[in-house]
Amino acid sequence: MKIAHQLYILTILMLLAMVSCSDESDSDLAASDSGSSSTGSGDEEPQQNEGLITAGEWNDLDNWDFWKEVIEEEDFAPNDRWGIMTTNRVSVQVVNGSALIVDVPVDLILDLGQGTPTMTLWSARTDNFGRAEMWLAPYIGGVQYSLDDLAFSVAGNRLGNAVRLYEEGVITLIGPLSASTSSQVVDLSFIVDATSSMADELEFIKDDLEDVIERVEEGNSVLDVRTSTVVYRDEGDEYLVRQSDFTEDLGKTLQFIDDQSAGGGGDFPEAVHTGLETAISQLDWSREARSRIAFLILDAPPHEEAQVSESIRNQIKEAARLGIKIIPITASGIDKPTELLMRQMAILTNGTYVFITNDSGIGEDHIEASVGEYEVEFLNDLMVRLIKKYTD
């Protein structure tokens, strides 16, 4: 009986030891996953939040047949909700010999001949791949013209290449080598929804943005990186929009980001158009640059009003003209109409679409993006990867 009692006590002690070890192992794993560390009681380091948010990326321009099919699905009905139609795509690459012509203006022009003045239908600038995306009547109500009446202009020089839609292939244009920029300037702007619904994710996003900017600065010593930030809320809030203009002083941008907090809002739509207009039309984007990127981080659509939709369409067109890639990053709370608009923004400005996923457990539920197979990445790694892709 005594031996049995001793065995019982020994068994209990062994189980307690196993549980203790398991708890310590789980704690160590959690600390490792979150990037946090501890130096012992009374000497804990602050938890690091960067690298926790998970996200996916989907480039509709690279998956054009998929986009043409998915846009017809019920989730996106009506697919012209925002007055945008992405059907008549004209894709060009500007070269001179083996050299890619970077950051050169390309115009799609209407020329009816017989002394009629030419008219520019769409303007863009080539990216670091020498690519530019042109669009024929992308907005509802636009006039459809015959392809035979269209022509290209590169750096102000009209070219005789025949215009054809993307489905018939990318068009190679021969541009003047002197027009290609040698600038190493990279403009990065962060446009952030700072309303109350973003509270769960804003603190993590702030840390991610700081991490992204610092890593870009450290990893690209040849590049001249300039950063800016725009935060917006909605009409009737404490403020409508705040901005930190382009600067080479990384500390200034980081301090502005760190000073922001979530508040206001209340209804679902927010002043997206005001944030976009401030970033695209009021910030001092470089006249010559290797890359210009506007990350639009939000969890709600703009107000669905005629003047708001028109403002957004105008800013998309202006972004394309200036060579600014809009890369939306959608957080929890967005619906399918918002996803539609964000992907249309990316498509029309030669950008790509990023969406935060549920894998991290941060924020509320995120809708499943209507995309094909994609890789789940940490948001900060994904943003650094995209910046590198569009600047190398």
Image (tube, rainbow, N blue to C red):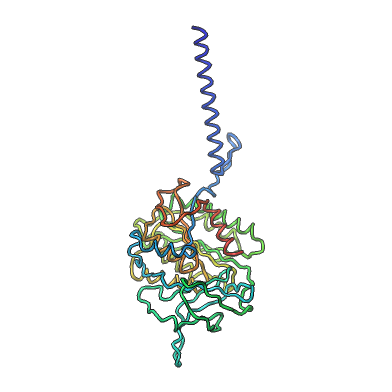
Which quadrant does the C terminus fall into? bottom right
Expressed as whole percent of the image width and height from the top left, the position of residue 92 reads: 52, 74
Expressed as whole percent of the image width and height from the top left, the position of residue 156 reads: 55, 83
Q: Name the residue at 56% across, 77% down.
A: 173
Name the foreground residue: 189 vs 349: 349
Q: From this view, report whether residue 48 is shown above or below residue 136.
A: above
Horizontally, is 166 left or right of 248 in the view? left
Inspect this view and state whether residue 337 appears. Answer: yes
Q: Name the residue at 57% across, 71% down.
A: 130
Expressed as whole percent of the image width and height from the top left, the position of residue 111 reads: 46, 86
Inspect this view and state whether residue 296 appears. Answer: no
In which quadrant of the rendered view does residue 141 lie?
bottom left
Name the foreground residue: 233 vs 153: 153
Horizontally, is 72 left or right of 208 in the view? left
Horizontally, is 242 left or right of 288 in the view? left
Q: From this view, report whether residue 157 is shown above or below residue 6.
A: below
Residue that extends furthest to the bottom in the rendered view of this protein: 115
Q: From this view, report whether residue 14 is shown above or below residue 319.
A: above
